[in-house]
Amino acid sequence: MSAPVKCTTHPDELAGWQCRGDCKAYLCPKCTAQLVRLYTCCRCGGPAHRLSVPRRSKGLAHWIGVAIARPLKMFPMFALFVLLLGGIAFVDISSGTPEVHRIATIVKLALVTVYALFVVDAAAHGAPDSRTPLRVARALAAVLFVLAPGIVYAYFVGVPGAAAQHDHAMWLFGGLVVAYVPVALAVAVSEAPMASLMNPFTMFEVAWRLGRTYLGTLVVVAVLVAAAVSLATGGSASLKQSVPTPLVGDAVAAIPWLWSLGALAAMIGLLTYVHGDRFGWGHTAEYVEPLYPKMVALGARKLADRSSAAAGMTGEITRLDAAERADAGKLDDALRTENAARAIKLYEGRATWSAAAVDDRKLVAIARCAVRVKRLDLAERLLDDAVARKGRSCGQAMLALAQLHGDSLGNADRAAALYASIVEQFAGSDVAKVAAKKLAG
């Protein structure tokens, strides 16, 4: 959805959410309540989801701005690398020996590479996470796999040097690096299979799918590379002279070119963040942005219906006969202690259970017990029942049912259909993220 929508209750207000419950109303901040990351409709109490737009609907200029601002979002890391590079430069200049200069150059190159890869990954995923180091290592391996032959050749030619300026092979290799490295990094941080990372043809196929988007990114990256090189060679020297304090001046001199490097690395990572579905990573429904990112839910949760429902449930529980109430207590104890066999025996020990005694959450828990004791038919029946109730655990029930079909029952088509339905119905939730990864894998 890209066009502005008005709130159903307040026609003068913009709607940032839509109810997925009974009323299906468009909701403004006053009509939407938030609990942690879940939104609810203040009209009917049902779940609500944010209205969103595809990330790719935003122009290149928008994402250039995001890339330029990325080092600021990672300021602690940016400041750390600035200090490290400044310290190494200070030691290098203070020593003045060729051996120290050679070591300092290698260390600075390593630091710059690690920083760039971390920024690529952070831009691709929105923020660093526990798997960032692994993806960074994969990205480094994917790039070195192709760069290694050229680096060896360049070493023997003597780059930089006069001979390299007239070597057509070096110019051809340089052009391939410019065209190949960005897409290789973008695919590497998407957690694609390692076999794909080592296949250059896969990378060029991805670049072809991206088309003009990739060409535009290459142009921006080339401009930022030129800016970083210019600042590193000329601008840093003049900036250092303006701050004569040792070490501090070296650190300050690293800020402009390291910022440019971070911006170009972010542009590469944004290829994955915006267009990852084009090269098979994730579902299209994942690559969306809130229609109004700064809009905040201000409403109060609707408690009337929930209270009446709770009162009704309490009434139903009190109307349970003593035997069912006792069996429900035993079932709860079995589930709490994860005694799968006893839980299944207690559940099947009664011909029928009322919804008050076994709600959809308990159905999911019993189904998991059934999977552990290899009662797959029972697990499928329980999960189907839980999904049909459309309660609070509907998403978890659908996810468990999809996993059951895909992992245990061998029904890949049914599992894929369920995963796709989860991504569509519960966009932005944890179950949707799990389902999207399953679809991508």
Image (cartoon, grey):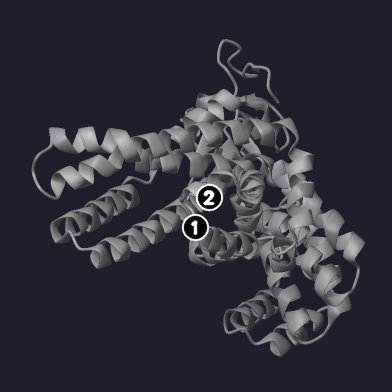
Q: Nearer the viewer, residue 70 or 317?
A: 70
Disc 1 vs disc 2: Cβ atoms closer than 8 Å?
yes
- In the image, residue 218 sits, relative to residue 187, either above or below, namely above
Q: Considering only order in the chain, which callout, 2 or 1, is on the residue closer to the N terminus?
A: 1
Q: Nearer the observer, disc 1 or disc 2?
A: 2
- The local crowd at label 2, few if under 14, some if 14 to 19, many if 20 or more residues have their Cα within 10 Å, is few
- In the image, residue 112 sits, relative to residue 332, either above or below, namely above
The x and y percentages for residue 122 are 49, 50
Tell me the distance, in whole angstroms, between the alpha carbons under discs 1 and 2.
Answer: 7 Å
Image quadrant in which you'd find residue 20: top right
The x and y percentages for residue 280 are 76, 52
Q: Residue at x 61, y 55 (%)?
A: 430
Identify residue for label 2.
Answer: 163
Image quadrant in which you'd find residue 9: top right
Question: How many numbered marks are there?
Answer: 2
The x and y percentages for residue 339 are 65, 87
| Disc on res. 412 | none
| Disc on res. 158 | 1
For badge 2, the amino acid type reads Ala
- Secondary structure at badge 1 equals loop
- In the image, residue 299 sits, relative to residue 165, either above or below, namely above
